[in-house]
Image (spheres, rainbow, N blue to C red):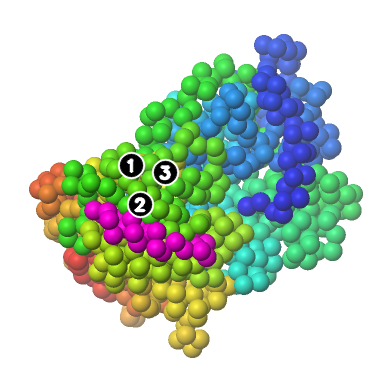
Amino acid sequence: MAANPHVLAIVFILSVLSSQWMYAAAQNSPLFACDIDKDPTLKKFSFCDASLDIKTRVNDLVKRLTLEEKIGNLVNNATSVYRLRIPGYGWWSEALHGVSKTGPATFFSSLVPGATSFPQVILTAASFNETLFRTIGQVVSTEARAMYNMGLAGLTFWSPNVNIFRDPRWGRGQETPGEDPTLTSKYAVAYVQGLQERDDGDKKRLKVGACCKHYTAYDVDNWNGTDRYHFNAVVTKQDMEDTFQPPFKSCVLDGNVASVMCSYNEVNGKPTCGDPDLLKGVIRGKWKLNGYVSSDCDSLDVMLTSHHWEKTPEEIAADALNAGVDLNCGNSLRLHTEGAIKAGLVKESVVDRAVSNNFETLMRLGVFDGNPSKQVYGSLGPKDVCTPTNQELAREAARQGIMLLKNTPGSLPLMPTSIKFLAVIGPNATATETMIGNYAGVPCQYTTPLEGLSASVKTIYEPGCVNVNCFIVRITEAKKVAAEADAVVLVMGSDLSIEAETIDRIDITLPGQQSFLVSEVASVSRGPMILVIMSGGGMDIQFAKDNPNVTSILWVGFPGEAGGAALADIVFGRFNPSGRLPMTWYPQSFVEKVAMTNMNMRPDLTTGHPGYTYRFYKGETVYPFGHGLSYSSHAHHLVKAPKFVSIPLEEGHVCWSSECKLLDALEHVCRNLVFEVKLRVMNVGNMEGSHIVFLFSSPPTIHDAPQKKLLDFRKVVLASRERTVVSFKVDVCNHLSVVDEDGNKKVPLGIHVLHVGDLQHSLNIKI
């Protein structure tokens, strides 16, 4: 999200210098707006009267501000208004998977030296557990509130990242919930609700303010000479509506998110932060955003210097404000808004709209209600950060996400009593910062893979490579310890030097000589050999999948502060793995023939483009979306599902007199078109564990519809031989519709096939 480091350094310095709030935080005596106990004269201001409705308070405040003061509150390092005793405010905090140190409005200190660092989002999403998504959000917001009370953070957190993980090379794919719009939308809603919703049920107020980013079609950072500051994402209306937009739509309509952030890139020739159709038309117009629109950091400057959208910074400022931007991460609006008004490019009333949206958000957060010690979360403090319960949740999240990709009979789980010593090999065996990925904070503590495994059995460690780049490989030493051990765990993969913000991959194979090291160690191992991949994106590890001496493969993502403990829980059978891949693992040949800048989701026979993601990709995979093994096995039996669904049409509808292949998914057509699918699920294995039930559908082949798409999912916990019934409500227009070439939702008539595991059921939709 950040721009170049020099600009960010300036932004950071300005935010510290101009924000009395943050300055006071450094002194451990934070200042708060409308603190009537400290200054009784503030009672005369309506904006300080918490008994009034928020819009009345906002209107009162904005009327009292000068133009200069309003402009000072259009940027992330918002300026104080001393005469009204309003301290400056730092908008930029991050909480992607725990309170982060990335945003300059957040500080760690001796009072709060760290915060719980959960797994990177891609691994948490692999749990397919909406309750877990929401619970993590609740814990993160509690720790955030505690830090706010100490003056160590703001209350606006620019998370989650809900972009679709379209291409395996994207360095920021690790931040996302994966490639599927349904999973990404459900994650977005649950995490936003966990962050924002208050325990007292007050829907008008916020615990913290979340932000769904980066709007929209943003998934190229720096690949083969193309960077995000210059990239024009050419996207069809069809792909926009059925792939890139759904998570943002869900954020706003279902999650009631407080903010949406526009991205750096252009979409079809227009910078997103200057596109009124995307901002005013869709977010504010169609979806009715209840909050503020923020620019990505320095993206207004990017519009000027990289996209060359306008000739002057004043024109850029006007374009952004007129398009619907309310808050500028950066200083473009601070520096150029007044000039834009004087030049007649933007009206002061537009500035009033923007600053009102910003202040309304702060008032919903209680920022204008005085000292937070008198408010709902006023008792939170350092004792509520890094609690044992929170740290255990980080371990549980990693356990639920880690997935077993391969398991030869007799390999995993290992029995500690049968192992005299375990060889632990690989550059990520001692990983710490690698485990938490990007946009991380300062963890409460680390448990590395080596530490986690060593807690259960005697281990001998050999790095094998100097680092994950693995240019220098210690084959002799690695083979020696492997040959002597009862079992081997190799912890390989990548780190943030290989895949991260501003770093997209070229290759998706294991870096350097890692594959050689794995194969050589496998050739001498005399017991189970477990390959552990720590990475943000997928890897072409076909060589290991095909090698019978590699008896098990685990993917642990970037598993968070407790990743090593969670890995050991699975290796030694204390936890039954249940994670499933939230993205397709492609072969290296895919990235050798597909340009990352090709945004077309659907295959194109004329160019040889094979398409993207399990919904459209036609080609071989290393591992498919949804893949993952367990120490148990599960059986599915269909209990209830209709064979026919009839759509009632009004008299005289055109489809009564002519043959129709599909219907417009309009409100009057779709009303009450919901049916139930019931399944009986049984754990037929010998070990208790979780199981994810996926409901997919394959629609009729029309309008380049997805070959398969995820409708819904449930996670159930079953003891050995236990069974349960899982129920899904299927909304015909929402779940079984497709999007045509013009971006319109249609309901195809004819045969739809429902899939659950190996079970299939045909359903005929007719009029």
Of label 2 and label 1, which has the lower sequence position? Answer: 2
| Amino acid type of the residue tagged 2 in the rendering | Val
Q: Residue at x 88, y 49 (%)?
A: 339
Q: Is residue 709 left or right of residue 103?
A: left
Q: Is residue 426 above or below residue 153?
A: below
Estimate how packed mark 1 is, as few (under 14), some (14 to 19) or many (20 or more) residues with alpha carbons within 10 Å.
some
Measuring from the top left, give residue 132's x and y in whole percent: 36, 42
Asked which secondary structure carries label 3, the reply is: loop
Please give the residue where the numbered disc 1 appears in the rendered image.
454
Q: Residue at x 35, y 48 (%)?
A: 460
Asked if one can make out residue 456 in the rendered structure from this viewpoint, the answer is yes
Query: Magenta stretch?
Result: 468-493
Q: Mark 2 touching mark 1, by CB under 8 A?
A: yes
The answer to which of 350 and 619 lies nearer the viewer is 619
The answer to which of 311 and 46 lies nearer the viewer is 311
| Amino acid type of the residue tagged 3 in the rendering | Thr
Q: Residue at x 50, y 49 (%)?
A: 434
Q: Is residue 623 left or right of residue 501?
A: left
Marks 2 and 1 sit apart, C-alpha to C-alpha, by 9 Å
Q: Is residue 108 above or below residue 528?
A: above
Measuring from the top left, give residue 732's x and y in whole percent: 32, 61
In the image, which disc is placed on residue 448? 3
Quarter of image, res 259: top right
The answer to which of 664 and 303 lies nearer the viewer is 303
Of label 3 and label 2, which has the lower sequence position? Answer: 2
Measuring from the top left, give residue 248's x and y in whole percent: 51, 54
Discs 3/2, front: 2
Q: Residue at x 38, y 41 (%)?
A: 451
Q: Within the magenta stretch, is there residue 491?
A: yes
Please give the residue where the numbered disc 2 appears in the rendered image.
424
Q: Is residue 537 above or below residue 124?
A: below
